[in-house]
Image (tube, rainbow, N blue to C red):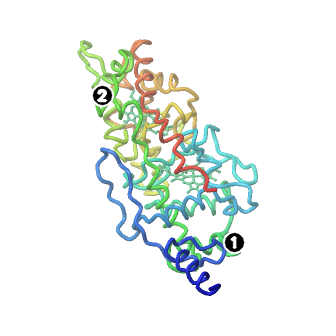
Amino acid sequence: MKNLYTLFTLTVLAMTGCRPDPIEPAVYNPTPFVLDIGDFPDPQLPADNPLTIAGVELGRMLFYEKDLSRDRSQACADCHIQQDGFSDIRRFSVGVEGLDGKRQAMPVMNLAWHYNGLFWDGRAPQVRDQALKPIQDPLEMNETLEGAIAKLAANKKYRDQFIRAFGDDNITSPRMGLAMEQFMFTMVSKDSKYDKWNRGEVTLTPEEENGRKLFFAEFDPTGTGRGGECFHCHAGHNFTNDEFMNNGLDTDAEFTDTGREKVTMNPFDRAKFKVPSLRNIAKTPPYMHDGRFVTLEAVLDHYDHGAKNSSTVEFLMQYNIQPGGLGLTAQEKSDIIAFLHTLTDDVFLNNPAYKAPN
Ligand code: HEC
Ligand code: HEC
């Protein structure tokens, strides 16, 4: 009777799959992760790194893992903070030894649609390459890959999750890169007020609507129409043309960071930087690669009349750098800022799927 009862219990447990956790060995689980992209165009994701639920979860664990830094003080998420649009509101992120980095942190968002290289200068071709760089950057996490791997390998939680994601517990840096790439591809901002307006769900205020029109309008040299020229470069559903450009921050004599030129060795690329997405822009001050502008008002003043001529400034900046600039009124600048605020996506900023795993 007792045996029968045990058999019955075991059968029920096996059928419901609810055996006690500690004895359950981790098994490979290739269940695909279904990316929710709303009405955005299908991203061209790399075919050699299909998103799986287990892989995304591993990437999330690594994104929040302080053990990836030399002194266990800093995770990716300490410079890419969800409530700040997965960016850092400090001008220069502070690395592990309190060293100031040289560039302003970038938001981690909608990377599934970034095809032209990562970082302000595009030096990392794919997200997987990018993910391993901060670990080794002396100004960031200052750890070696061997050091990071050794710490993860000593942790059963990671050995198990590598099995679920990759089939065995061989912890390698390429696999770490792939898992973080998977997680970062799932970070999609698509539910801002502007998106809801695009879907016909809400209306914009008169200020936001005027700002929207100015954002998408060309400067009119005859002076009859009004335009902000922004859409030329901040184009498409992510508000970036995915190119490297010089938006007139400095004259040749003032160039300190040569940007894209460091990657291509081409003087034509001097002081060019990635055109950043403007999604959640109100949440990610300060602005530009060096965080020189603290407010959106300062950014608008730059585009209106503060842009400077140089050997590599974009032709598209021709009206910004002319005497008198775009000649926008205070109201027009504030309307463009009101429009930029409609790009804030509270669903993204609070999405539990992007928070630290338990
Ligand atoms: C000390 C702060 C700091 C830490 C820690 C850090 N980052 Fe960053 N992140 C930055 C800065 C600063 C940049 C811009 C650097 C540049 O362009 O040279 C950046 C850029 C990026 C970008 C490029 C985004 C784009 O649009 O091109 C991604 C993605 C990213 N980080 C992900 C990560 C991941 C993953 C980790 C952890 C493995 C991490 N970061 C750790 C500060 C940090
Ligand atoms: C010629 C292309 C171009 C045009 C036109 C342009 N931008 Fe930009 N924008 C850029 C580039 C390039 C950067 C990054 C520059 C850097 O950091 O060196 C940038 C940066 C920004 C930033 C800071 C983003 C961040 O994450 O720090 C904001 C905000 C911005 N632009 C808004 C606007 C608005 C508003 C307009 C229209 C009034 C506009 N831009 C017109 C190319 C352009």
- 144 over 241 or under it: above or below: below
Q: Position of residue 11 (x, y in %)?
A: 53, 79
Quick one: SS at disc 1? loop
On the question of residue 318 being in view, the answer is: no
Q: Residues within 10 Å of mark 2 (few under 14, many from 20)?
A: some
Quick one: SS at disc 2? loop
Q: Identify which residue, 219 or 155, lies in the foreground.
A: 155
**In this figure, which residue is indicated by the disc labeled 1?**
155
Q: Does the beta carbon of the residue at mark 2 sit less than 8 Å from ligand 2?
A: no
Q: Does the beta carbon of the residue at mark 1 sit less than 8 Å from ligand 1?
A: no
- 81 over 52 or under it: above or below: above
Q: Position of residue 70 (x, y in %)?
A: 72, 63
Is 106 displayed left or right of 210 in the figure? Answer: right
Which-is-in-front pick, marks 1 and 2?
A: 1
Residue 73 occupies which quadrant of the picture? bottom right
On the question of residue 240 being in view, the answer is: yes
- 7 over 30 or under it: above or below: below
**In this figure, which residue is indicated by the disc labeled 2?**
216
Specify the amino acid type for callout 1: Asn
Q: Position of residue 344 (x, y in %)?
A: 46, 33
Q: Identify which residue, 81 or 295, lies in the foreground.
A: 81
Q: Tell which residue pokes out farthest to the front in this image.
A: 1
Q: Name the residue rendered at 58%, 77% in the picture.
A: 9
